[in-house]
Image: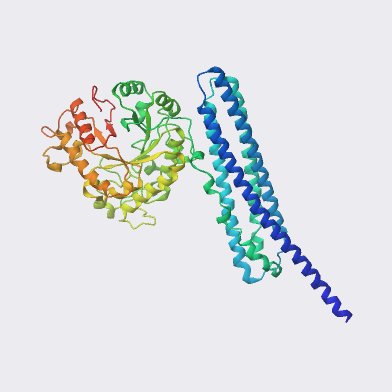
Amino acid sequence: MRNKWYILIPLLCIFLTSCSAEGTLNKETKNVTEYNQSLKDNIEEISQLENNISSKLKEVSSSEKEFQQKKHEGLELLKDQESKYEDIEKDFEDYEKSLEKLDKVNTEKLDEDNVDNFKQLHESLTDHVNLLKSYLKDVDHLNNKQKNMFNTLKEDEATFKEASLYIKENNDIINELNKNLTKLITSHNNLNRIIATKDESLKDNLEDMTNLTVENITMENSFPERLAFVPDINIPYPEDGVKGIYVSGYNAGGAQLDELIGFMNESGLNSVVIDVKGDYGDIMFDIDTGNELISNFTFNYYDAEAVLKKLEENNIYPIARIVTFKDTLLAEEKPEWSFKKSDGTLWKNGNGESFINPFLKEVWDYNLDVAVAAAKAGFKDIQFDYVRFPEGFETYSNELAFDSGTYDKNDRVSAILDYVNYAHDHLKQYNVDVSVDLFGYAAIEGEAPGIGQNFGQLAEAADVMSAMIYPSHWSEGYFDVLAPDTEPYKVIDGYMEVEKEVFNTLENPPVSRPWLQDFTASYLGAGNFIQYNKEEVEAQVKALNDHGVNEFLLWDATNKYSRGVNFK
């Protein structure tokens, strides 16, 4: 009988230990949920505080006394917000402690049937940690937005100094949150041990644990557009629509820019397209992307900060032109990202230019890095030009060696469409529009599979469509015109009829912002061209207006535009 008692005593100890583990697990699961709710409550309070801050800053008047009072109130609100950040930091700490306690629960033995349940919990907590990462990024964006708010207070040096100090303190808090998140992730990773254990004493707690899912702790809806990236440049979208000109990256850095700004102010034009990535792949201003390849091809043709500030002072809307897949510099540096001839040499077109391969995600990311840098600099619209395969590619592609990635080598349309969607998704957080340049004949034909452009599909993917509908670019007979360059109104009118039909079939049609011709195409030969001046430009604008389109861009490679044009 005594020997039997010796057997029962260890079993009783195991039972008591498992009961303790169950109680700890239940308690800490509840704590995690409560801490998370506290986080969400604090985030909502921060949102309200920021709305109050914005309201206070908007109320600032020309009255010196009232101005000083409003600034003081704004600073007080920001101090309150700092306190809320401290509360969130505390919640992170409590969350970390709770996970540490969960890790210490006796989990050396786990019934095999319960492994899947623990895996689900592990995945949910992993998603939660990823959401916390996203949250910290949004806090950084919020900090940038606060910085912009303080820039409105520069008239008062003392207040601005105090604001700068607050920003520094706020950055310190964010840094601490990042440190805590690192610890939290480490603690979370230790939960892997739970999956690998077999403690039957935890069986009764599994159902409660599975209630702690990403669905009931998600925070992704707590960060509306107010937390999106806000650059220092503040230039609103033109009320009467974009009416702009092209300025090369070279001229953006010279005296001609001032002349062109004067021209725009006098003529009623309100927007400008500036090269960010040029026709050979050269990056026009110094950008810091961390991408060594981009650094290799970066030139300081103009100071983007100074140029954008000048445009802001003149209320001129900036659009970044990015020549996407025509990129000789990158093709020569990375021939495996381009197209090769049978002898292994790099393929070039008749002008000695090479393209990089639109099938490859590495190429997508390269261009996207440039686009993000342009958005961060303050450009409000990212315009992708040459977002296509080389002209006539379908006629010689079989003679070239290239990597088609995950695509069929002939499915060029899908590759181009996927790139535009990919870029659009990644640029949303920077509050910029995405526009696409493409040949006008893509709308007429519906699809140009050789170069990979389907007009309707691209129209649904982009915010703005900028079809290049220069009269000089149409062949004899289009729109029943023998020499299209000689009849600008009739050509533009004929094109717009087709584009309008396509847009009418779309659920969410983009803005139509065509490229118009302000250059003389003398290369067409006698009888096939006319001089383009004031009247020819006005004829094209009128054709757009007659179809209810009030946005356009003028192209002249030398940036010498017709004067005295009535653009209304």
- Does residue 48 appear left or right of residue 333 in this picture? right
Based on the displayed image, in which of its 4 quarters is residue 216 positioned? bottom right
Q: Nearer the viewer, residue 209 or 122?
A: 209
In percent of the image, x 42 and y 28: which residue is there? 308
Residue 49 visible, this orientation: yes
Based on the displayed image, in which of its 4 quarters is residue 533 positioned? top left
Based on the displayed image, in which of its 4 quarters is residue 164 positioned? top right
Q: Which of 519 and 223 is in front in this view?
A: 223
Residue reaching furthest to the top = 64
Q: How many labels does the image show?
A: 0
Q: Nearer the viewer, residue 319 or 510?
A: 510
Is residue 428 depicted above or below 98 in this figure?
above
Q: In which quarter of the image is the C terminus?
A: top left
Residue 345 visible, this orientation: no
Is residue 226 depicted above or below 15 in this figure?
above
In percent of the image, x 12 and y 42: which residue is there? 480
Query: How far across and how far down the image is residue 427, in percent?
Result: 43, 42
Q: In which quarter of the image is the N terminus?
A: bottom right
Q: Which of 413 and 565 is in front in this view?
A: 565
Query: How far across and how far down the image is residue 490, in percent?
Result: 15, 37
Q: Which colour scheme is used?
A: rainbow
Residue reaching furthest to the bottom = 1
Query: How far across and how far down the image is residue 170, in percent?
Result: 62, 34
- Does residue 441 appear left or right of residue 24 in this picture? left
Query: How far across and how far down the image is residue 271, in percent?
Result: 34, 30
